[in-house]
Image (spheres, helix red, strand yellow):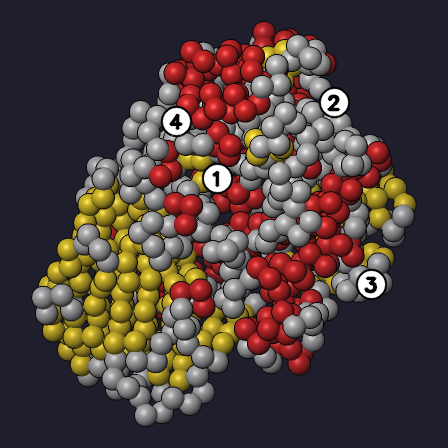
Amino acid sequence: MHTSKPARVLWYDTPAACWEEALPIGSGSLGMMVHGGMEREVLQLNEESLWSGRPAEWDNPDCARHLEEMRALLFEGRYREAQALCCRYLVCAGRGSDDAYYGSFQTAGELVIGSPAEEDRSGYRRALDLDSGLASVRFGTVRREHLASERWQVTASRFAGGRGEYVISFARENCRVSCHGAALTAAGSNDALDFCTVAEVETDGTVRAGAHTLQITGARTLTLWTSTATSYGTDERPEEICRRRIAGARAAGYDAVRAQRAAQLREAMGRCTLTLPEDPALESLPTDARLARVRAGGEDTGLLRLYFDYGRYLFLSSAGGRLPANLQGVWSRDLWTPWTGDYHLNINLQMNYWFVDAVGLEEYGEPLYRYLAFLARHGEKTARVMYRCRGWVAHTLSNPWGFTAPGQDPAWGSFHCAGAWCCRHLYEHYLYTGDLDFLREYWPVIRGSAQFFADFLVRDPNSGYLVTAPSNSPENSYLDPATGEKTAVCAGPAMDIMIVRELFTIALRCGEALGVEDPLLGHLPGLLRQLPPTQIGTKGGIQEWMEDFAEWEPGHRHISQLYGLYPGWEISPERTPELAAAARATLERRLSHGGGHTGWSRAWIVNFCARLLDGAGAQAHLHALLAQSTQDNLLDTHPPFQIDGNFGAVAGMLELLVQSHEGALRLLPALPPAWREGALEEVRVRGGFRLSFRWREGRVTEGTLYSARGGRAILRVNGETHTLETTAGETIPLPL
């Protein structure tokens, strides 16, 4: 089954007026934002490990000494006193993410390429081709293109046309810039790191090196090779790394580097294809003009399809390095990035990776999985020092230095279940691939998290259930019944219990799949039986806390109590209709109170709607995501820019078209009304299957099922259920 390939190009008829309008390219570890100015091309650079900060002692031993006192105050309903105590002890040592030792993801600097004003400025076009990874600029006789190579870990910029005169400079604080021959070198140090950017010119013109600039004259073409490296995790000098990478790319040649990157991206982007109704008249408009139409209330399913492709392109460009994609992927213009550009573990990092297996990019999940193993090693000390527990724990925030302690404020920073939530990604990867070797490698991470909660859970004397305490419901607060004050610290919030229930279940299933004999696994069923059930509150929604507290902010952007709906599997319209109805009521209440549902929060709501089988609701929220939370370059804004909304929307759009979390493969479970016809090709689903199908007017009209491993597939399509027995490597038509 094949469909005609839709255009995958963002384009504009004016230069970027600011960073939020520039176009992103990336190699996984390198990032570049291309502005496309006529007389002054600005190329803002990033490298994934260019962080300030350093390893430090973050764990607070005073927490363990006061843990029982905190719990006792909570169980006695003395919430104000409990919170005051937690503010002193349920925190990291130091000032957490406000402290210099925690650090921030940082820009590598800006390369500025100045050129004389051109008389002919006609036909301006700035574009980003998602299939080739080329960001291009043209006007008059001027032609430029920029790419980032994952294979060679360089960026390459080709300049042609115009007057052939250029001045290349570099700008960054705390950086020493020098020029020799045809190369500019910018080097510096930053707490625990050395870093360096090297830019080398290859041209048929004349290059003159000044103290801090390169001047080029008489150039018919100019190729600017750039690489940035740091000393993170290596003994090799960053400058040597940059020069080695550039030498390899130059030896291959610009045309070969360009072709290889295009072939790599086309293959990866082609692993999954979505086709939606397109209006050719809208495709003739610049991307920002199309977005402006949506902001004015217009529908544009073609732009949504482009947004889907763009999310996958951004992932491929920012997630293939040594570290996971952070809050801004691999792009930041700042030395102190908003929210430090770190790894927020109370949804944001997880949202970045929700769709990775479904679109066939499983190898790009490896940086996340390695990072979780890294966190587990650091989190063992945090568990021991702060809670006197075995296993490992991580909280709301982390960074490349292994920060696993709570944040500096327990109201948002004491989310104990962050690492446990991440463990579901390890198990989901196994469900999609069936890779037992992978599961065996990461079983210690899952087991260690389960061990922590087996030790950490405490019996609530009021209910008799085992709960997490002290904790918080990210990042919401309630009204203390006694004082009416805003309070966050609590015992056994719904999200915690849902995650712990899921974690213990995952550990038991992994143990069975691996044939593990472990005393911990014999202990978990009894713990599961003692966890509190998910409750429905007096307002008809899922109860966020053990007690039916009044919310401080009823429209809060976090909707943590719906974890069991998505990404979890606890709440289902068919298996648990009462809980599903309560989940819908929760969502309606949040929205009716006008909360800050922008960016990542709106993307999460799209996934909630998909699981509630509400295609019309999802369509409305996708429209709102574009209209209210998307910048002209289609990057998500919280505000400011956060990349998780881009990634979460991709997951949501897939979830509207196919679901496999309940054992059956369900096609078109929540089709948006405007998606009258379309196709989804080569989408991966749990069980080792791949689906390709077309639909029209709400019904699947043709399709195939590929089975990688063989086995039984239960297929729900067009209102009927079919049980299919498959053999490994077999492709069969869908029974329609």
Amino acid marked by disc 4? Cys
Q: Nearer the viewer, mark 4 or mark 2?
A: 4
Lower sequence index among marks 2 and 1: 1
Residue type (three-letter) at the residue carrying disc 1: His
| Residue 556: % across, % down | 62, 44
- Which numbered disc flags the more N-terminal residue, 4 or 2? 4
Disc 3 + disc 1, Cβ < 8 Å: no
Q: Specify the label residue 533 is tagged with.
A: 2
Question: Could you tell me if the residues under marks 4 and 1 are in contact, i.e. CB atoms within 8 Å?
Answer: no
At label 3, the amino acid type is Arg
Q: Nearer the viewer, residue 170 or 60?
A: 60
Is 140 or 39 nearer to us in this picture?
39
Q: Quadrant of residue 294?
A: bottom right
Residue located at (65% from left, 13% from top) = 460
Q: Residues within 10 Å of mark 3 (few under 14, many from 20)?
A: few
Residue where numbered disc 3 is placed:
696
Among the two numbered marks 3 and 1 on one chain, the one whose residue lies closer to the N terminus: 1
Location of the N terminus by quadrant is bottom right
Counting residues from the N terminus, which is met first, the one under dot 4 or under dot 3? 4
Of the image marks 4 and 1, the number of the one nearer the N terminus: 4
The alpha-carbon separation of the residues under discs 4 and 3 comes to 55 Å
Q: What amino acid type should be assigned to the residue bearing mark 2? A: Pro
N-terminal of the pair, mark 2 or mark 3, is 2
Instruction: Tell me the quarter of the picture where residue 110 sits.
Output: bottom left
Q: Circle 1 — which element?
A: strand
- Crowding near pointer 1: few (<14 within 10 Å), some, many (20+)? some
Q: Residue tagged by mark 1? A: 344
Q: Residue beneath label 4, please?
A: 92
Secondary structure category for the residue under label 4: loop
Would you say the residues marked 4 and 2 are in contact, meaning their CB atoms lie under 8 Å apart?
Answer: no
Mark 4 or 1, which is nearer the eye? 4
Q: Is residue 156 visible?
A: yes
